Amino acid sequence: MTELIRQYERDIETIRGRIIELKQRSVSSRSDDEGSLRDRIELLQDEMYELMYSAALMRRVTGPKPITPSSAALLAKAAGDAAC
C-alpha cells in the first residue's frame, strides 16, 4: 500500500504541474478556448483532490499507531519476565 501512496503523490505532483501550465496558457491566450481551459483545470483539480483524499485515507491505515496504556500492557505481557 505504501507504493500506491507514493504513486498517488507522484500523480498529484504531475497534475499540479499540468494545472500550472494550463493556467499560464489561459492567461497568455485570451480566446474562445478560455472556457475549455477553465473546464480542464477544474477537472484536474477535482482529480487531484480525490487523489489527495485517497492518499490521506491510506496513510491513516498504514501510518504508525500510537501506543496506548492498554497496548503497552499487552506488549509487556507478551515480552514476559525478560522485560523486567
Image (cartoon, rainbow, N blue to C red):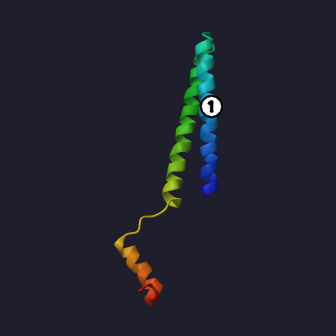
- Quarter of the image containing the N terminus? bottom right
Q: Tell me how many marks there are.
A: 1
Res 70 quadrant in image: bottom left
Kindly identify which residue carries mark 1: 17
**Relative to 46, is 21 above or below?**
above
Residue sitting at x 60%, y 19%? 24
**Relative to 27, is 1 above or below?**
below
Res 81 quadrant in image: bottom left
**Relative to 15, is 28 above or below?**
above
Left or right, 82 with reference to 51: left
Left or right, 32 with reference to 60: right
Residue 21 in percent (x, y) is at 63, 24
Q: Is residue 6 visible?
A: yes
Residue sitting at x 41%, y 79%? 74
The one of 84 and 33 positioned closer to us in this rendering: 84
Left or right, 36 with reference to 65: right
Left or right, 63 with reference to 70: right
Name the element at disc 1: helix
The amino acid pointed to by label 1 is Gly
Q: Is residue 36 visible?
A: no
